[in-house]
Amino acid sequence: MTGLIGRKLGMTRVFDAEGTHVPVTIIEAGPCPVVQVGQTQVQLGFGAKKPKRTAKALAGHVKKAGLEIGAAPRVLHSFPVAGEAPKAGETVTVAIFAAGDRVKVTGVTKGRGFQGVVHRHHFGGGPETHGNTRHRKPGSIAPGTDPSRIIKGKRMPGHMGARNFTELGLRVVKVDAERNLLFLGGSVPGPMNGLLTVRKQGGPSRHD
């Protein structure tokens, strides 16, 4: 397997063999039951839904995999097959990772609501002098005569955050298989208890 589903528990720090403190993010990764196995993809689940909140279609999908209906996963996600694929009904744990591995983490960033260009795009803003009324405004937006429209992609005020983001090249600092915990160096997208997917880094990383 190349990845797992998990949730972000928060950040802390650990000390390496040389006594240097390393900021890490703790992720509860798995255990993830195998719900479906295809030719190129393996579908994993994470969490559990209440039976009364489980749709009949999902209950039948889970039952076909040999899992209990009362343990219908809260989240389903597919990962590419690498090597020998697990069988439906088996469980994939955090043991697929080892200290020193490079991984990429995908999650939904924190929502910041509607923000101006100073906060959203780090504009410098206007003059702060007396009488000026354009301290945090974007300034000129587009030429009036040609092309007489705003160019696509123009950085403007708008909704900030709450989008899918993938952080590449994070290093696995520690694996706690007993508690299904993964310690990754650095930060990952999303709030505490936010859902994440952790996948092995296939190619080179900018952090190497």
Image (cartoon, rainbow, N blue to C red):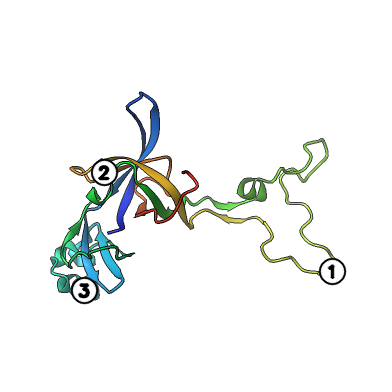
Between 31 and 144, the residue placed more toward the observer is 31
Does residue 152 appear anywhere in the picture?
A: yes
Between 127 and 42, the residue placed more toward the observer is 42
**Residue 196, percent from left and from top:** 36, 53
**Residue 146, percent from left and from top:** 84, 69
CA separation in Å, label 3 and label 1: 57 Å
- Residue at the extreme top: 19
Q: Which residue is mark 2?
A: 181
Picture mark count: 3
The structure residue drawn at horizontal position 74% and vertical position 65%, both measured from the top left corner, is: 150
The structure residue drawn at horizontal position 19% and vertical position 71%, both measured from the top left corner, is: 59
On residue 146, the disc is: 1
Q: Earlier in the sequence, mark 1 or mark 2?
A: 1
Q: Are marks 1 and 2 in contact (CB under 8 Å)?
A: no
Q: Earlier in the sequence, mark 3 or mark 2?
A: 3
Q: How dense is the environment of label 2, judged by Cα within 10 Å: few (below 14), some, or many (20 and up)?
A: many
